[in-house]
Image (cartoon, grey):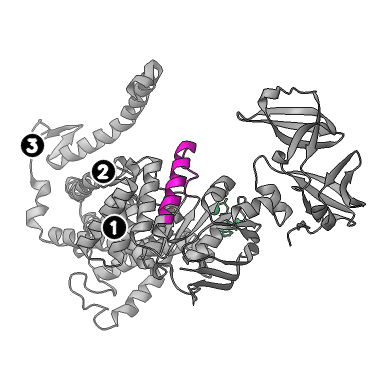
Amino acid sequence: MDETMGVGGRGRAILLLTVLAVLTVPIVVGYLWVIISTFSQRTYGLIPVDANGHPGGLTLRNWSFLWKDAAIWRVTVNTFVLAVGLTVGIVVVSSLAGYALSRISFPGRRPFLATTLVLHAFPSVTLLIAIYFVLRWITHIPVVGRGIPVIGGFGYNTLGGVILVSVALELPLGVWLMKGFFDQVPWDIERAALIDGCSRLRVWWEIMLPLIKPGIAALSIFSFISGWNSFLIPYTFMTSQEKSTIATYLRSLLSDTAPVNYSTVAAVGLFQLIPVMIFFLFTQEYLLNIFSGGVKGGS
Amino acid sequence: MIVKLEHVTKKFGDVVAVDDINLETRDGEFVALLGPSGCGKTTTLLMIAGIYRPTEGVIRFGGRVVNRVPPKDRNIGMVFQSYALYPHMTVLENLTFPMRLKKVPRTEMLQRAQQVADMMGIGHLLDRKPGQLSGGQQQRVALGRALVKQPDVLLFDEPLSNLDARLRLSMRAEIKRLQLDLGITSIYVTHDQVEAMTMAERIAVIRDGQLQAFCPPNELYDQPRTLFVASFIGNPPMNFLEVEVVADGDAFKARCPEIEIPVSAERGRAAAGRGKVVMGVRPEDIYLTRDGIAGEVYVVEPLGRDDLVDVRVGDVHFKTLVDPGLGLKIGDQVRFGIRPERVQFFDPRTEHSLLWN
Ligand SMILES: Nc1ncnc2c1ncn2[C@@H]1O[C@H](COP(=O)(O)OP(=O)(O)OP(=O)(O)O)[C@@H](O)[C@H]1O
Ligand SMILES: [Mg+2]
């Protein structure tokens, strides 16, 4: 590769890198500023200063929510449960539905595909009130409503309810994505498996799922991150902001009446970012593995 | 296992892919399904495999109606044109997969896989993934996977068409040999007539979903029942010309405006008095001679062992095979004869043979 790129290729690479670097600088500086400011009393540009304006004044005060406010750990766990629940729900349902929509012809298949796409185009805000009534109704179902450990249940003001609604709202995208991946798997491989003795479900599990691993990984990442960052649904359907998710906890810091400590807000924001970064590092490596070790031929 | 198709029809919406096919194999027979692209060969095969369900008609395996039996319960092995190996499994896992599903004990499974791998000459590749194999090796694995489950019926869908010419030749012989040794009823789809002629005991010729003929290769060649079979089988293809056959005492002659061709009484009688009919002559049944029909060399195509020469007589062209030693050139005047007992006659309207029905 390197040899074939030649002089022109190198020039292009340098140009490309320059453009990327220029575009990246503001982002990097922005994050740098956020990081510095969370450890400072105040900042002057990128330089931390103390109350009198002299350089210095480093402090951990902005991070004190980690040990002073027990709620942060509770919302962190909640957010994690929400993100995992959302991921599991979306991956399971999308990969099953995507398979059916890709491979099985049944009446109403095309209308179904078209409808999901149209529904996805609607902003979810428009549905909030309707969903509220649905959740209220679910609350009254015994056990399922609000008697399940960890997620609380699937009713109003429970984590499970938030998961349920979030899964529902993100499913159209997931189903379409999975359908696309299943469409890429050659029919002959599936036929061979059926002839070799698989049932349809077994084909799905043993042949199709392993072949669309990259798709599942991508969908998992999207789902996890969107769950981890989700704000609107938990904000709407859980009553106490401090007790729901990190995003709503963050919102609760932005009080309308008291002065806002932006350094603390930045610290909480950074705190929220850490797991996503870790998750991304891991899954990215996994994705690269899949693609580089990927399959040639056989199709 | 005897496979029998009775009035089998398959429609995809308005498209009739397979149209009322009747066909019965013998036990252990090697049958080829031959036809041009899109004629319904794969569809027929997939119905036998149980992937498609016939729209009409009945499929029997040894007397048992299998229309509603799912593929996994038919005990068939199938080899695909695309090989269709499982890309995420190693060769060994590909080979053992069918047995794993049948819950064959582990030791027996490994033993059988090893045996098949040795038979197919892929024993040293067991740890590789399909993506790391050449096309020919993948084909062997695919064949091994079909054989390892000890199927009652083997199905092939153009298994050799992705291989290079040389490899195709050797695999052809190998598959035929294997099939003879194992005695498994086999149905082999191809659009390559040479493949069908060399491998199969009987060939089913399909055109537009309809069965045109089902007979042994030499019969297909010497006694084509339809114009389509006559034109499809044989390379270089048969010459066709429109003639009128007339009786001249005991002798029969095929006449078209500028030419008069003597034909044997036996063949001429069936075509005489019918007005215009289509006459078919194979290139190898045309020979150069001193006192024959006069024509002019129109094109010469060297094929190596022979020259394929196009001889023009008025508006009619005859293709024939000629010894390259004669050194014929374009524009040469030649005279040729046609073996009178080898000509074919077809009804121009129904396209059926006038000799073999
Ligand atoms: N799933 C399907 N839906 C609709 N039409 C189909 C389907 N499968 C096949 N057909 C049509 O049926 C006809 C026969 O197709 P088939 O695949 O059996 O041809 P074939 O003889 O195997 O051709 P080839 O040599 O190109 O593989 C074609 O006209 C094809 O377009
Ligand atoms: Mg085909």
Disc 3 and disc 2: Cα gap in Å? 69 Å
Task: Give the vertical position of B149 relative to A136 (above or below).
Answer: above
| Label 3 Cα neighbours within 10 Å, binned few <14 / some 14-19 / many ≥20 | some
Q: Which mark is residue B124?
A: 2
Q: Earlier in the sequence, mark 1 or mark 2?
A: 1
One can see residue B340 in this view? yes
In the image, is residue B169 part of the stretch drawn in magenta?
A: yes
Disc 3 chain ID? A
Q: Nearer the viewer, mark 3 or mark 1?
A: 1
Q: Which residue is mark 3?
A: A57
In the image, is residue B177 part of the stretch drawn in magenta?
A: yes
Rendered location of residue A259, percent (x, y): 20, 51
Could you tell me which residue is drawn at 50 percent across and 76 percent down?
A: B63
Residue type, mark 2 in image: His
Q: Quadrant of the N terminus of chain A?
A: top left
Which portion, as a residue range, is magenta?
B159-180
The answer to whether B207 appears left or right of A138 in the picture is right
Could you tell me which residue is drawn at 15 percent across and 42 percent down?
A: A38
The answer to whether B151 appears left or right of A259 in the picture is right
Residue type, mark 1 in image: Thr
Q: Nearer the viewer, mark 3 or mark 2?
A: 2
Ligand 2 contact, mark 1 (Cβ < 8 Å) = no
Disc 1 chain ID? B
Instruction: For the residues labelled 3 and 1, say whether their Cβ atoms are less than 8 Å apart.
Output: no
